[in-house]
Image: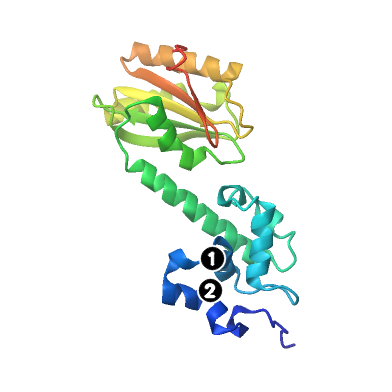
Amino acid sequence: MEENNHFSIKNWNEDDRPREKMLQKGRIALSDAELIAILIGSGSRNESAVALSQRILASANNNLSELGKRSIADLMQFKGIGEAKAITIVAAMELGRRRRGGEALERRKITSSNSVFEYFQPLIGELPHEEFWILYLNNSNKVIKSGQLSKGGITGTLVDVRLVFKEALQIGAVGIILAHNHPSGTLKPSHADIQLTKKLKIAGDGLDIKVLDHIIVTEKAYFSFADENML
């Protein structure tokens, strides 16, 4: 059966088409809703793609960071958004997050707790689950390598201390920085956070590899063990 899709972008007036607008005026000229409309291509029988995109954005307080937290199932609650369109939006949001992470990774030298936060916020600051990461540094405080140690929660049993320092020895790191996120937004370290930090610090002292800091990252702020004299 032929689809009755009056609100498909291809049926709009030429001046209202986001794709053509991008070609003629450049990507900066497009609103967030118009960019999302390009992703989804069409709205529903009674709603244009831009109107639908505006409604989706409004549900996230017109904030792309908030939209990036929406799951495929969340997006499919909107009439006109099926699985394929929801996946497209989520994929685009993830690409944006990774791009920001890549930009942060270019700032390789760690000079303060704030520089650690700037490094990790694009990677884990907006995630709905906890992840624990580590930075391996050389004697100039430049990042040799970063890696995820665990996902989904923080307990001592989820981090193999031997593997942490085996990696540090293999790549010649002289210092490490621990980081994990709190999706709840709280900056207060938990008992497990404190115990794990102590465990890794003691192990590092024995190998002459310093645990320089442990950063708790949220969407907009951070807590530093080093700044609070907890190391």
**Residue 104: % across, % down:** 38, 42
User: Which of the colour schemes (rainbow, by chain, secondary structure, one colour) is used?
Assistant: rainbow
**Residue identifier under label 1:** 35
Q: Nearer the viewer, residue 227 or 141?
A: 227
- Hey, which quadrant is residue 146 in on the image? top left
- Which residue is pictured at 67% across the width and 68% down the height? 51
Q: How crowded is mark 2: few (under 14 residues within 10 Å), some or many (20 or more)?
A: many
- Which residue is pictured at 32% across the width and 30% down the height? 110
Residue projecting furthest to the left: 140
* Residue type of the residue flagged with mark 2: Pro
Q: Nearer the viewer, residue 105 or 197?
A: 105
**Residue identifier under label 2:** 18
* Residue type of the residue flagged with mark 1: Leu
**Residue 25: % across, % down:** 43, 73
Relative to 94, 69 lies left or right? right
Quarter of the picture holding the N terminus: bottom right
- Hey, which quadrant is residue 45 in on the image? bottom right
Tell me: residue 89, above or below residue 224.
below
**Residue 211: % across, % down:** 38, 19
- Which residue is pictured at 54% across the width and 63% down the height? 31
Task: Please report contact status of discs 2 and 1: CB closer than 8 Å, yes or no.
Answer: yes
